[in-house]
Image (cartoon, helix red, strand yellow):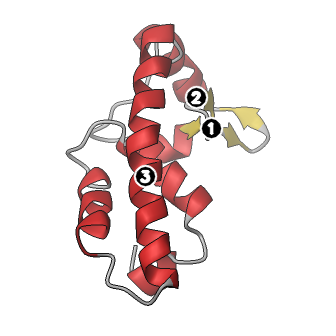
Amino acid sequence: MLNPCIDDPDEHLVFLDDGRVEPALINGQESRKGKASIQYLGLARAELLQMRARHRRTVIAAIRHTIAALEEGRDPGTDLDDLLTLLSSKEAYVAYTRTLVRTHMSAYIEALGL
């Protein structure tokens, strides 16, 4: 099972855009630590999927507003601040948030220094 003090969850877990989680592939094989963590911690249980769905709405709104501001030449201001807060390691669902940002903001990540 993953030890978050030692292991990098991104090396063992993959969060899908819809909130589901799967073991990461390491050398073509499912991560044993990822698989065990999903099973024993119940990371795929319905309540967590629902909570991630609610979280996704918040993150996607911040992403949309940030992108709209950037494309219109405006300062993304508080929307970007909100997004940066959601990406803080102390926040819930940060690994999932990183997945959403990488998926939906890939063209802007470097320019924003994310």
Q: In the rendered view, does 29 fall on the left or right side of 70? A: right
Q: Which residue is mark 2?
A: 21
Q: Nearer the viewer, mark 3 or mark 1?
A: 3
Please provide percent x and percent y for residue 95.
Answer: 43, 44
Q: Amino acid at mark 2?
A: Val
Kindly indicate the quadrant of the structure image that contains residue 54.
top left
As drawn, the residue found furthest toward the front would be 72
Q: Nearer the viewer, mark 2 or mark 3?
A: 3
Please report whichever mark, 1 or 2, sits nearer to the chain's N-terminal start: 1
Q: In the rendered view, does 34 fall on the left or right side of 7? A: right
Q: In the rendered view, does 25 fall on the left or right side of 79? A: right
Kindly indicate the quadrant of the structure image that contains residue 93.
top left
Q: Which residue is mark 1?
A: 16
In this rendering, the answer to whether 20 lies above or below 103 is above
In this rendering, the answer to whether 46 lies above or below 91 is above
> Secondary structure beneath disc 2?
strand
Mark 1 and mark 2 in contact? Answer it, CB < 8 Å: yes
- The residue under the point 32% across, 55% down is 87
Please report whichever mark, 2 or 3, sits nearer to the chain's N-terminal start: 2
